[in-house]
Image: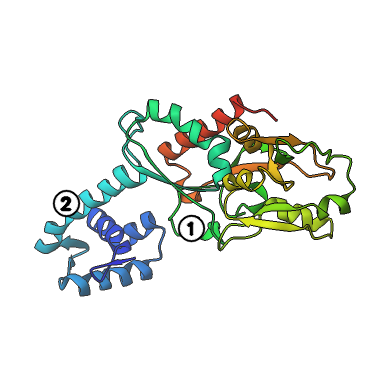
Amino acid sequence: MRFQKLDLNLLVTLDRLLTERSISRASEKLFLSQSATSSALARLREYFQDELLVRVGRTMVPTPRALELSQSVREVLLQIEGRVIKRPEFNPAEESREIKIIASDYSLMAGLASALIDIRREAPKLRFQFSPQQLNPREDLERGEADFLVIPEMYMSPDHPFEHMFFDDYCVVSCARNARDYSSMSVIEFMRQSHVAVQFPNSKPTYESWVFERYGSERNVEVMVGSFAAVPYFLTGTDRIALMHRRLALVLSQSMPIRMSEPPIDIPRIDESIQWHIYNDGDECLAWVRQKFIAFFKDTDPV
């Protein structure tokens, strides 16, 4: 990586050369060949327009310019080691930062929003930015634009660590005045009902859409919406139905006139997980938040 035309990796080499004052010993400590270390020294000399180390007899002596640089380079490396590589001891009560999470409104209503109540009590200075799922949330994680992904395990990247948060199954939701028994319907008859489905903008099909595709029969989607929270508004006063996560249905049934019933098809339960970038594996703050989320769902698991 270059900064102001300087390859920052060369600072590590310079620090070791000025400490050892020997190309061979510096090479051993850097796990480099002597030719690679000599090449790095040549590049440093060119950049600083100074010999930096000169041979006097059988030893190498730093120039005045090298002595001026020595302490500054050492301080920079120590600061990187102490504040970047070795992060300050995490204190929830004092930690002040923004944590960016990609999650659906389902995950928010299923428990993430409620989990923030306890988190805020212990870490009042933390800020959270929740963004909806896009076409490829993995890329957002790779680019560092998200600290966490909260998505089904089947969509997780194999290149980064993740942990299980909770399981959920599915139910059929309909208007509270709709008394039909959907559990005894044939698959074909169920597919022919008027469905409300969810499809996020610029995103892959939802899990329930994937489930329906497995049956090789296309459902009759009468209304397509862009969020799970919008579904009940298109059920009330109609005979429409929707396949919905049970956790979400339980939450929405507390404020919306909807009815829950069992589906006539076998639907594998969903494994909602949380993923983070492998480079953040040692981030104590993110680990603490992650465990808070996991503990919340464990304590409130209805499934």
Residue 129 percent location from the top left of the image: 41, 46
Residue 145 or residue 199, whichever sits in front: 199
Observer-nearest of 214 and 13: 214
Q: Callout 1: helix, strand or loop?
A: helix
On the rendered structure, is 208 left or right of 136?
Answer: right
Q: Residue furthest left?
A: 64
Vertical arrangement, residue 176 with respect to residue 51, above or below: above
Instruction: Tell whether 77 sits left or right of 99.
Output: left
- Which tag, 1 or 2, sits closer to the chain's start? 2
Between label 1 and label 2, give the one nearer the viewer.
Answer: 1
| 207 over 288 or under it: above or below | below
Residue 265 appears at what percent x and percent y? 84, 45
| Quadrant of the frame with the C terminus | top right
> What residue type is disc 2 on?
Gln
Are the two marked residues, 1 and 2, in contact with CB atoms closer than 8 angstroms? no
Distance CA(mark 1)–CA(mark 2): 39 Å
Residue at 33% over, 28% down: 93
Identified at 66% across, 56% down, the residue is 223
In the rendered structure, the answer to whether residue 46 lies left or right of residue 92 reads left
User: Which of 266/254 is in front?
Assistant: 254
Please state which amino acid type lies under the numbered disc 1. Asp
The kind of secondary structure element at disc 2 is helix
Residue 262: x and y, percent? Answer: 79, 37
- For residue 21, which quarter of the picture? bottom left
Q: Which residue is mark 1?
A: 140
Res. 138 in view? yes
**Residue 78, horizontal then vertical, whole percent:** 26, 46
Q: Residues within 10 Å of mark 1 (few under 14, many from 20)?
A: some
**Front-lying residue, 117 or 42:** 117
Reading the image, the residue beneath label 2 is: 71
Looking at the rendered image, the quarter that the N terminus falls into is: bottom left
Q: Outermost residue, front direction?
A: 237
